[in-house]
Amino acid sequence: MAVVYDKYYQVENLFGEPYPELIEFLSNWIKKGTLLDLGCGQGRDAIPISRMGYKVTGVDNSRVGIEQMNRIASKEKLALKGIVGDIFAFEDFRNFDIVLLDSMFHFNKKDKKRETDFIKELIDKIKNEALIIFCIQDSGNKVKILKDIVNDTGKLEKMTENEFEYVYKDAETKHKSRTKYKMLVFSK
Ligand SMILES: C[S@@+](CC[C@H](N)C(=O)[O-])C[C@H]1O[C@@H](n2cnc3c(N)ncnc32)[C@H](O)[C@@H]1O
């Protein structure tokens, strides 16, 4: 079934470069183990992370995004596997040292319960000492909601919190928009 991002991803590399803060954190992390990128899109993060030596699995419900990512992975012989699927149906969290969720939660009225339940389940199922990295738009009370969910579980310890600006450039109109972002890294 086609999803809305199949259309957006007609533009290759739609979201541009990964955040330098994310790349820096993962380059400095000594154990380049297994990483699960939930909602990996076209591989904006998953591709450079696998080039660093991590063994990456990306899940996204956009077949177009996954096919673009898998093409690059196969051309460069990367340890990167893209799966077309619904992240809310994914369960196999125990196999990963790091789980990344970049721009995946909005906590809108209609999605808040489902997203909250999913984050709690994820925290419950990841193995001890695994990391979760959230990159989230710092607008409204999204960051507070996320922190409250995490705190409620009492299972994670915050390692880092970075604030940065994400500059999105529209390929067609050349319009630039600037958005405040936070990267929050927790360990179990
Ligand atoms: C804002 S984009 C972020 C993409 C990528 N994480 C990045 O930062 O470049 C959101 C992505 O989530 C995917 N997505 C949304 N809901 C999903 C779901 N339930 N299961 C799998 N992927 C989903 C979309 O297809 C899209 O690729």
Image (cartoon, grey):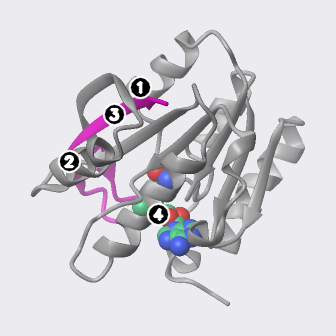
Specify few, some or many for label 3: CA neighbours under 10 Å numbering under 14, 14-19, or 20 or more. many
Disc 4 versus disc 3: distance between alpha carbons?
Answer: 17 Å
Question: Which residue in the protein does label 3 denote?
Answer: 184
Q: Is residue 112 left or right of residue 78?
A: left
Q: Sequence order check: which comes first, mark 4 or mark 2?
A: 4
Question: Measuring 70% from the left and 73% from the top, which residue is drawn there?
Answer: 63
Identity, as a three-letter code, of the amino acid under mark 1: Pro
Q: Earlier in the sequence, mark 4 or mark 3?
A: 4
Magenta residues span 167-188
Q: Which residue is mark 4?
A: 118
Q: Secondary structure at mark 4?
A: helix
Above or below, comparing residue 116 to residue 127 in the picture: below
Amino acid at the residue labelled 2? Val
Residue 127, image x, y percentages: 64, 36
Which structural element holds mark 2?
helix
Q: CA distance from mark 1 to mark 2?
A: 20 Å
Q: Give percent across and percent down for residue 165.
A: 22, 36
In the rendering, which numbered label is found on residue 20?
1
The quarter of the displayed image where residue 117 is located:
bottom left
For marks 1 and 3 on the same chain, the one whose residue lies earlier in the sequence: 1
At label 1, counting other C-alpha atoms closer than 10 Å, the crowd grade (few under 14, some 14-19, many 20 or more) is few
Residue drawn at x 40%, y 42% is 134
Name the chief secondary structure element in magenta. strand
Residue 141, given in percent of the width and then of the height, sits at 11, 55
Marks 4 and 2, Cα distance to the nearest angstrom? 16 Å
Q: Earlier in the sequence, mark 1 or mark 2?
A: 1
Single out the mark in the foreground, 4 or 2.
Answer: 4
**Circle 2 sits on which residue?**
143
